[in-house]
Image (tube, helix red, strand yellow):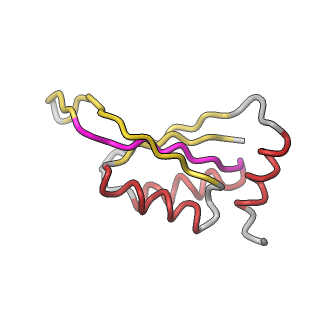
Amino acid sequence: MPTVYITAPPEAATELAETLVEERLAACVNRLDCRSTYRWDGDVVSEEEVILLAKTTDEQYAALESRTEELHPYDVPCIERFDEEAVGPSFGEWVAESVDSEK
């Protein structure tokens, strides 16, 4: 069961998180404010961003990644997949049920 790490500008983060959950691509998306420092076009840039942690399933990961790229305002969005080695059974069940488009 993957957790997907995504960074987004504050003005896009809420809509992105809500869309992923509404479209059943993620069971839950946690949002954390942060300040990111990175190199872009040869310059060091520091900006406010939001970290999104999206809980999904193996089956829905590709669709979540594709939809995030489609909606994301950045040319190169940060989308990183972390695979869980251990997930509590009840939480894993809830995630699976929440992203099941048949329900």
- In this rendered view, identify the residue nearer to me: 81 or 97: 97
Q: Quadrant of residue 26?
A: bottom right
Left of 52 or right of it: where is 28?
right
* Position in image of residue 5 (x %, y %): 51, 39
Which corner quadrant holds the N terminus? top right
Is-magenta flag for residue 99? no
Residue under the point 35% across and 35% down: 34
Examine the rendered structure and indicate whether residue 101 appears above or below residue 57.
Answer: below
Most prominent secondary structure in the magenta stretch?
strand
Q: Residue furthest right?
A: 89
Examine the rendered structure and indicate whether residue 92 appears above or below residue 84.
Answer: below
Residue under the point 72% across and 60% down: 98
Which corner quadrant holds the C terminus? bottom right
* Position in image of residue 69 (x %, y %): 43, 55
Left of 36 or right of it: where is 96?
right
Q: Which range of residues does the magenta coloring cover?
A: 47-58
Examine the rendered structure and indicate whether residue 103 appears above or below residue 29.
Answer: below
Is-magenta flag for residue 55? yes
Residue under the point 57% across and 47% down: 54
